[in-house]
Image: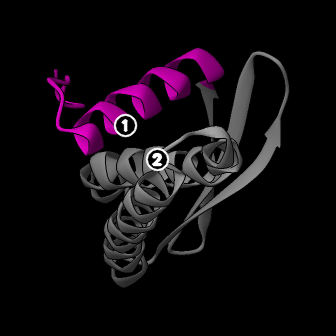
Amino acid sequence: MLADLMKLATPIHNYIILDMTLKTLERDRQYIGQLKMASVFDQWYDLQNKKVFEEMKANRDLLYKAGCKVEKTGADDLVTEYTILFRGHSEVRRYSNIAIRNGVMEETKRLLGMEYRKPEQ
């Protein structure tokens, strides 16, 4: 059982980062209206939101087929807690908010076409 869950570690991590990236893009979008090229950036945000959502959906579907579900169960200033439900068992994982922020920054760099570090690195 634990070995099966370990095989899903990367998709679980990707799902969490993509979910937070999508939320960050949606929150940051409110500042576009102040830019001179707002309509262009608005189109870019639409494309990126769709791209991130499709990647997140693919990860969610993969996890679902494996019998796994990820739920955010709590957060404070330092950590965010997720419950991983896997074939009738649950496991609580705590992620440092700084680590999540760094993952979202790397994902945003990827979306912008900049050099970024992959999660394996």
Q: Amino acid at mark 2?
A: Met
Q: Give x and y (percent) for residue 68.
A: 47, 70
Horizontal relation, residue 84 to residue 64: left or right = right
Does the magenta run of residues contain 117?
yes
Seen at 40% across and 57% down, the residue is: 40
Horizontal relation, residue 100 to residue 61: left or right = right
Quarter-wise, where is residue 11 in the image? bottom left
Q: Is residue 40 above or below residue 58?
A: above
Q: CA distance from mark 1 to mark 2?
A: 20 Å
Seen at 17% across and 38% down, the residue is: 113
Instruction: Give the colour scheme of this rendering.
Output: one colour
Quadrant location, the N terminus: bottom left
Q: Amino acid at mark 1?
A: Thr
- Number of residues whose C-alpha sits closer than 10 Å to that of mark 2, classed few (under 14), some (14–19) or many (20 or more): few
Q: Is residue 8 above or below residue 104?
A: below
Does the magenta run of residues contain 46?
no
Q: From the viewer's side, name the closer residue of 58 and 31.
A: 31
Q: Is residue 16 above or below residue 49?
A: above
Q: Is residue 94 above or below residue 10?
A: above
Q: Give x and y (percent) for residue 121.
A: 16, 20
Residue 1 visible here: yes
State the residue position of label 2.
Answer: 37
State the residue position of label 1.
Answer: 108
Q: Give x and y (percent) for residue 106.
A: 33, 28
Single out the residue that lies furthest toward the front: 36
Q: From the viewer's side, name the closer residue of 76 and 116.
A: 116
Seen at 46% across and 47% down, the residue is: 37
Q: Give x and y (percent) for residue 67.
A: 43, 78
Look at the numbered disc 2 and give the secondary structure of its residue. Answer: loop
Q: From the viewer's side, name the closer residue of 30 and 65.
A: 30
User: What is the span of residues highlighted in magenta in the rendered image?
Assistant: 96-121
